[in-house]
Structure formats: structure tokens, C-alpha cells
């Protein structure tokens, strides 16, 4: 009976493209013979994938999210690949593009099995848990202490994922043939890890490889130039990766840069003053929707929060409960919040209409993540950067003093990467720079008709109109002069 199943299984594996030449099981010397429990584990897992691959995913989507819901962009293609069991998968979809559906819908549709989701930030984890609850998907957060009930989705931090306690938990799941896949959300954060900063994230790729299950990596920001470094850190074989890449820029966001800082020694102060003016004008017009102001250091966040009379959010708040309370208060009625990048990854607040940066992040991908909090519901929104002129040193006296004290954020001030200089300088359409750097797309000339125009394209439009009016006036003047000459008989 077992041999019959294996023969049928091989045929289905070929049809579905599932599990062929499992890269996770091979060591440096080539393939090894798998133990019986591993074979049984894959057979049980295969049966679940075979059932799931025949499921009507559009019907499941509507059951989960409502009768009018449709797949957007590459969502359906990615999910089809996931339910076929293809691995490893890397999905690069712009902010607000619905990447979380890639693990939520398969979990919702399966009758059993567990998906582990590695989440780098507390705020993102809480947001994802809330979304799972609304979609009627069982989930829980893994902690080193306490019970660990069987759930469709288990959320874990990268630091916890590599511990012996969590690996024992995974072994128990695999002993019951219950682990379907591991998803790494906001996977670009692996590129930020170092021996001094979240060093456990450097171990994550090797740990996932040991587990030998389907792996899915999700992000909105992985520039083509960073792919090789990412594959190396995540321990992914580049020739086996199933890559899904869509456009990073968002049609409904109007990108703008405001240059300030006539006096280099007052750069940060002038930036903050301008930020307060922009926010005051916005609030004075009684615009609908929320506002996020981003700053690169905790000290600056707290100072701007005090100046604007609103709450602030950063990684060094007293406790996880304090963060959750502050975030909930903002969600339930607060219009404005000032934050570090701790509020910059994956948080799904639909009605943010204005994102303002007090100072430009050093890296373009950080800016894309944070500006992408705007307009996640598709409505018209704005992303404004207030910063120094390109080429000017990035520290004034105040930020230099913080640097000496070791409190300066790694993303604040300092030397901008070349792409940031180019974006801020404004010689080309803002989207043109974003598309080329973030997606490797060279075909853009400017903002298109169905997109909110950036400040560069808006300026060009008005300059073109003024030039046209001048030309028309010159033609009219010449025509009037011609008529005058004719009437005088000259």
C-alpha cells in the first residue's frame, strides 16, 4: 500500500511541482538518504498540499474577506505557488499590496496544519494578530514560557525563532506532521542585521534550512542590487528561488521634498519648524485622515511630539504593553502621532493621509517603507520629506552631540546613499528614481495620468502651462501687430 501511495505521490509531485529535489535536505556533499520519519512527514504534508491545491481559492478569499473581494495584482499567482508547495518563494510587493494574504488565506483554507510567521516588530505582530482575529484564523504568539496551543498561525520574533526552546516546539510540530511552512515577514530586515545589531537574525536562514519545510519571504523593499546579499544571508539558492516582483511606487501617493536649512548649525531646528508648519496647515484645513511624522532618533521624536501636542511611538518605550496602549489610543481616535521606524513596517492603518519625514532616512528603502504607511486604502495621500540640501553635511551641532553620547539612530543624518541624494535633488521625477532603484525599471519618464503627481512633475506641468501662455501671448501680440500694419497700409 505504501509503495502504491509513493508511486501516485511521485506523479502528483511532478504535476504540482512540489518537493522535487528538496534543497533543505542536502549538505555540502550532496543529497543524503532521508530517515523514515522524514519520508512519512513529507507524505503527510504532501497530502495536505494536494488537497489545498485543489481548493477554490477565490471562493475561500470571499469567505474570509467578503463576497465582493477580488485578488489584486500578483496575489493570486503568489498564493497558487504557495499552495502548490513551491519553495523557496520571495514576494516583493509594494506597501499596502496585501502581502499578508499570502499566509493568511492558505491558513484559512486548510483544514489542519500550522504556519509559522517570523515577525521583526512588536507593532507589526499585534497588527497581524488583529487581522487574523477579524478573519477568524486561530493564531497565537510564541513565548518561551507558557502553553503553546495548536494554532493555524504562530507568530514569533527572529530572536526567539533561533532558540532551543522554539526549535523544540518546531520538532514537536514536525513529529505530528503539522508544520506546513515558515513565512518571514518584512524579510528585508535581515539585511540590517550585524554582530552588533539583532545578530540572531543572521542565524535565521540556517535554522529555516534545517527545518526542511516550505519557506516564504515577504517584503515591499528589496532592490535588485540587494538580492544577492539577501540570498546569502537567508541561505537561499539563487537558482531555486521563485521570485515575484511588482512595482514599489504607489499611484495614490503624491511625493514631495521641502529643502530647508540656510544655516548648517541650525539644520535640525529648521527642519522641525517646517514640519510643524506643514502639520499645522493640514490640521487647520480639517483634512480627514491620520498623520504620521517620522524622525530618526528617540530624542527628536519626543521633542516633536511635545511641540505638536501629540503622542509618540518608539522602540524604547517602557514596555510592550505601553507600546500597544499608545498605538491603540492613536487608532481609536488620535489624529497625529510622531514615531521612529518602529512604526514603519507593515502596520495596516488604512486612513493615513499624510506622512511627513523630519529629515531624510539614509537609505531609500527605509523611506519607501515609511512613506508607504500613507493611503493604504487607495485614497489620495501625501508623503512629504523636510530635509537639508543634497551635498550638505548631515549633522548639525545638536545631532553631533547625540552621536558623541551614543544615542544617535543609525538611520538619522550621516551620509545618504547615492539614491537618496538623487531622490532629494529632484532633477528627475521622484517616481522615476524610486522605480529604477527599488525595482530596476527604467521605462518611466514621469508621473502618469492615473497617478498623483509628484512635486517635480507638478512643477514641470505648471512651467509648461506658463510657457504655453507666453507663446500664445507672443503669437497674439504678433497677430495684433500684423493687423495694425495692414490697417495702416504698410
Image (cartoon, grey):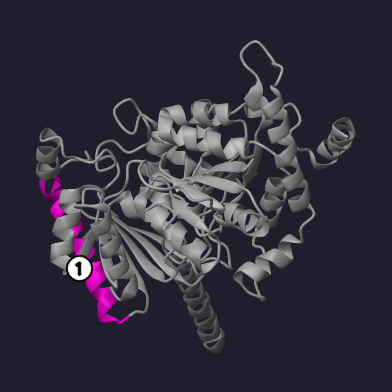
Is residue 261 in view from this perspective? no
Q: Is residue 334 left or right of residue 22?
A: left
The residue lying furthest to the top in this view is: 29
Is 35 on the left-hand or right-hand side of 426? right
Q: Quadrant of residue 165?
A: top left
Residue position marked by numbered label 1 in the rendering: 310
- Quadrant of the drawing holding the C terminus: bottom right
The answer to whether residue 310 is above or below residue 54 is: below
Q: Residue at x 64, y 62 (%)?
A: 72
Q: Is residue 265 magenta?
A: yes
Q: Is residue 468 left or right of residue 112?
A: left
Q: Which residues are magenta?
A: 261-286
The local secondary structure at tag 1 comes to loop
In the shown orientation, is residue 348 left or right of residue 38?
A: left
Residue 408, position as x, y percentages in the image: 19, 40
Give 278 or 427, whichever is nearer the viewer.
278
Q: Is residue 244 magenta?
A: no
Amino acid at each position: 500500500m505504501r509503495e502504491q501511495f509513493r508511486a501516485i505521490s511521485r506523479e502528483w509531485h511532478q504535476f504540482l511541482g512540489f518537493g522535487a529535489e528538496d534543497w533543505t535536505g542536502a549538505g555540502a556533499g550532496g543529497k543524503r538518504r532521508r530517515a523514515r520519519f522524514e519520508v512519512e512527514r513529507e507524505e503527510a504534508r504532501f497530502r495536505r498540499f494536494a488537497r489545498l491545491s485543489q481548493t477554490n481559492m477565490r471562493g475561500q478569499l470571499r469567505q474570509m474577506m467578503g463576497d465582493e473581494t477580488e485578488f489584486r495584482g500578483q496575489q493570486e499567482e503568489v498564493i497558487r505557488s504557495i499552495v502548490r508547495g513551491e519553495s523557496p518563494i520571495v514576494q516583493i510587493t509594494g506597501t499596502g499590496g496585501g502581502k499578508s494574504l499570502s499566509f493568511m488565506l492558505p491558513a484559512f483554507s486548510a483544514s489542519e496544519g500550522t504556519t509559522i510567521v517570523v515577525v521583526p516588530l512588536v507593532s507589526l505582530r499585534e497588527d497581524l494578530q488583529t487581522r487574523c482575529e477579524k478573519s477568524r484564523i486561530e493564531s497565537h504568539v510564541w513565548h518561551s514560557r507558557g502553553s503553546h496551543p495548536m494554532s493555524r498561525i504562530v507568530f514569533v520574533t527572529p530572536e526567539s525563532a533561533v532558540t532551543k526552546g522554539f526549535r523544540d516546539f518546531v520538532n514537536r510540530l514536525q513529529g505530528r506532521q503539522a508544520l506546513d511552512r515558515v513565512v518571514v515577514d518584512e524579510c528585508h530586515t535581515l539585511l540590517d542585521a550585524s554582530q552588533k545589531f539583532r545578530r540572531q537574525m543572521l542565524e535565521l536562514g540556517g535554522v529555516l534550512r534545517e527545518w526542511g519545510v516550505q519557506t516564504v519571504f515577504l517584503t515591499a523593499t528589496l532592490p535588485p542590487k540587494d538580492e544577492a546579499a539577501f540570498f546569502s544571508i537567508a541561505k537561499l539558492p539563487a537558482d531555486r528561488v521563485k521570485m515575484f516582483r511588482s512595482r514599489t511606487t504607489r499611484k495614490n501617493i503624491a511625493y514631495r521634498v521641502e529643502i530647508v536649512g540656510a544655516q548648517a548649525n541650525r539644520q535640525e531646528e529648521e527642519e522641525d519648524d517646517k514640519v510643524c508648519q506643514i502639520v499645522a496647515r493640514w490640521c487647520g484645513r480639517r483634512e480627514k485622515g491620520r498623520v504620521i511624522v517620522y524622525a530618526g532618533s528617540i530624542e527628536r521624536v519626543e521633542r516633536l511630539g511635545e511641540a505638536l501636542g501629540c503622542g509618540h511611538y518608539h522602540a524604547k518605550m517602557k514596555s510592550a504593553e505601553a507600546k500597544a496602549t499608545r498605538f491603540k489610543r492613536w487608532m481609536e481616535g488620535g489624529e497625529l502621532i510622531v514615531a521612529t521606524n518602529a512604526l514603519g513596517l507593515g502596520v495596516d492603518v488604512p486612513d493615513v493621509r499624510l506622512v511627513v519625514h523630519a529629515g531624510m532616512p539614509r537609505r531609500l528603502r527605509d523611506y519607501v517603507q515609511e512613506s508607504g504607511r500613507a493611503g493604504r486604502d487607495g485614497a489620495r495621500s501625501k508623503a512629504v520629506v523636510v530635509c537639508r540640501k543634497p551635498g550638505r553635511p548631515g549633522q548639525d551641532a545638536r545631532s553631533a552631540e547625540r552621536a558623541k553620547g551614543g544615542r544617535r539612530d543609525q538611520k538619522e543624518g550621516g551620509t545618504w546613499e547615492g539614491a537618496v541624494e538623487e531622490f532629494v535633488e529632484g532633477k528627475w521625477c521622484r517616481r522615476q528614481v524610486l522605480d529604477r532603484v527599488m525595482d530596476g525599471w527604467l521605462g518611466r519618464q514621469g508621473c502618469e495620468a492615473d497617478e498623483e503627481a509628484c512635486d517635480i512633475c507638478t512643477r514641470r506641468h505648471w512651467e509648461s502651462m506658463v510657457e504655453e501662455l507666453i507663446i500664445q501671448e507672443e503669437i497674439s501680440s504678433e497677430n495684433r501687430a500684423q493687423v495694425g500694419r495692414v490697417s495702416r497700409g504698410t
